Amino acid sequence: MSEEQENPQENKPIDLSKNQNPEPAPFQPFGNGPVTPPPFQQPPPFGQFGGGGFGQQNLPNATAALVLGILAIPACCFYGIFGLIFGIIAWILGAGDMKKYQLNPGLYTESSYKNAKAGKICGMIATILSALVIVMFILIIVGAISNPQMFDNFIKGIK
């Protein structure tokens, strides 16, 4: 066998004095055989991406926003302070997670987006109700201080 037949893919210098026009070899991928995808791809380890579909994860604060938003509504009855605090936090957390979802919706699950949205809405409602309760208590206190006689008559009328 000749040397050319033994190593056909080996690079050899071209003698330009003989005016040869060698044809370029067709493109072949690096290696010996054709390129094929791997026969088996393993799924990611359990729990790596949170709940949801393949490669999707839950929004980081969606559950916290929902829980605080739900707790904020009955907390309005406690002089409005706790409802205001929980409501504002739920509103901010829910709005932040909604922005994260809108920037990259394929990365997060839709259920966590809905939880963040519900938490934001509950937080908004609780914040407004708490603000109204606080304003009502402030008006009652100011009215009692400015006109104690009328306040006493009002309290006696209730009993």
Image (cartoon, helix red, strand yellow):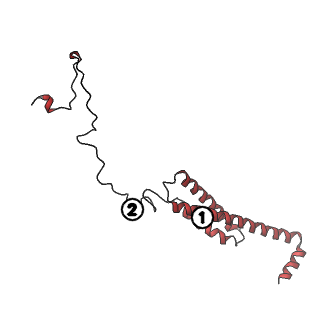
Residue placed most toward the observer, 73 or 111: 111
Give the structural element (helix, strand or loop) at label 2: loop
The residue under the point 43% across, 56% down is 55
Q: Is residue 100 above or below residue 6?
A: below
| Snapshot quadrant of residue 140 | bottom right
Labelled disc at residue 159: none
Relative depth, front residue between 25 and 41: 25
Horizontal and vertical percent for residue 16? 24, 17
Precedes in sequence: disc 2 or disc 1:
2
* Left or right of residue 1: residue 123: right
Which amino acid is tagged 1?
Ala
Across and down, in percent, residue 134 comes to: 75, 67
Which residue ends up furthest to the left in the rendered image? 1
Q: Are marks 2 and 1 in contact (CB under 8 Å)?
A: no
Inter-mark Cα distance, 2 to 1: 28 Å
Please tell me which residue is depicted at 83% across the width and 82% down the height of the picture.
Answer: 158
Compared to 32, does 100 lie above or below?
Answer: below
> Can you tell which mark lies on residue 46?
2
Mark 2 or 1: the one toward you:
1
> Which quadrant holds the N terminus?
top left
Residue 32 falls in image quadrant: top left
Tell me the quarter of the picture where residue 91 sits: bottom right
Judging depth in this view, the residue of 115 and 152 nearest the camera is 115
Label 2 neighbourhood size at 10 Å, few (<14), some (14-19), many (20+)? Answer: few
Q: Position of residue 90 (x, y in %)?
A: 62, 62
Q: Left or right? Give the position of 38 relative to 2.
A: right
- How many circles with numbers are drawn on the protein? 2
Residue position marked by numbered label 1 in the rendering: 118
Q: Quadrant of the C terminus?
A: bottom right
